[in-house]
Amino acid sequence: MNEPLKKYDVIIIGGGPAGLTAGIYTSRARLSSLLVERGAIGGQAVNAWSIENYPGFVEGVNGIDLTQSMHEQATKFGLETLYDEVTGIELDGRQKIVKTMQGSFTAAAVIIAGGSERQKLGVKGEAEFTGKGVSYCATCDGAFFKDKTVAVIGGGNSAVTEASS
């Protein structure tokens, strides 16, 4: 016999800033909401030692601190968090069934905020200096390196576009 599925109004897949923002809005609207994240809450933002382009933080904010606050705000309104990997989504009439390694859940709506993963170079020192000189977003972090000698590496014309901005 199949065990009954836990039901939610909304299931959010991905715990980065977009998923956390969705969680704040859905939970605040009193929709039962589940956020499923396979890694660390905060997505790529947790790697930023200082985020200066987020409104409301004149001196900037650490990525971990920002996303932790976002998560606390969402849970204050009732967001539930499951640390697990989504293995599939199925439709059952108007309901969506989200399958994870720990079980299956159903919801009327699913928000996919899966984020992205930066392509790494795989060079010595890259991992230890990420966020401390190695950056993956010239638009985000370029101001930190004003008047300094930098190397910009990228595929296609994306690196040239970012370097010239």
Image (tube, rainbow, N blue to C red):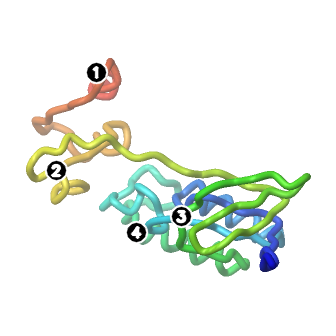
Which amino acid type is shown beneath numbered disc 3?
Answer: Glu
Q: Which dot, 2 or 1, sits closer to the camera?
A: 2
The first of marks 1 and 4 along the sequence is 4
Which amino acid type is shown beneath numbered disc 4?
Answer: Ile
The first of marks 2 and 1 along the sequence is 2
Q: Residue at x 74, y 55 (%)?
A: 110
Secondary structure under the numbered disc 2 in the rendered image = helix
Label 1 vs label 4: CA separation?
30 Å
Label 3 vs label 2: CA separation?
27 Å
Question: Circle 2 is placed at which residue position?
Answer: 126
Mark 4 is surrounded, within 10 Å at the Cα level, by few (under 14), some (14 to 19) or many (20 or more) other residues, namely many
Label 4 vs label 3: CA separation?
21 Å
Question: Circle 3 is placed at which residue position?
Answer: 85
Q: Is residue 125 above or below residue 15?
A: above
Label 2 vs label 4: CA separation?
20 Å
Which amino acid type is shown beneath numbered disc 1?
Answer: Val
Question: Circle 1 is placed at which residue position?
Answer: 160
Mark 3 is surrounded, within 10 Å at the Cα level, by few (under 14), some (14 to 19) or many (20 or more) other residues, namely some
Question: Circle 4 is placed at which residue position?
Answer: 64
Label 1 vs label 3: CA separation?
36 Å
Q: Residue at x 39, y 53 (%)?
A: 52
Mark 1 is surrounded, within 10 Å at the Cα level, by few (under 14), some (14 to 19) or many (20 or more) other residues, namely few
Q: Residue at x 10, y 35 (%)?
A: 149
Q: Is residue 131 above or below residue 119?
A: below
Q: Quadrant of the C terminus?
A: top left
* 142 left or right of 121 in image: right
Which of 145 and 116 lies nearest the eye of the viewer? 116
Circles 2 and 4, Cβ within 8 Å, touching? The answer is: no
Mark 2 is surrounded, within 10 Å at the Cα level, by few (under 14), some (14 to 19) or many (20 or more) other residues, namely some
Residue 89 image position (x, y, % from top left): 70, 54
Q: Is residue 21 above or below residue 143?
A: below
Which amino acid type is shown beneath numbered disc 2?
Answer: Glu
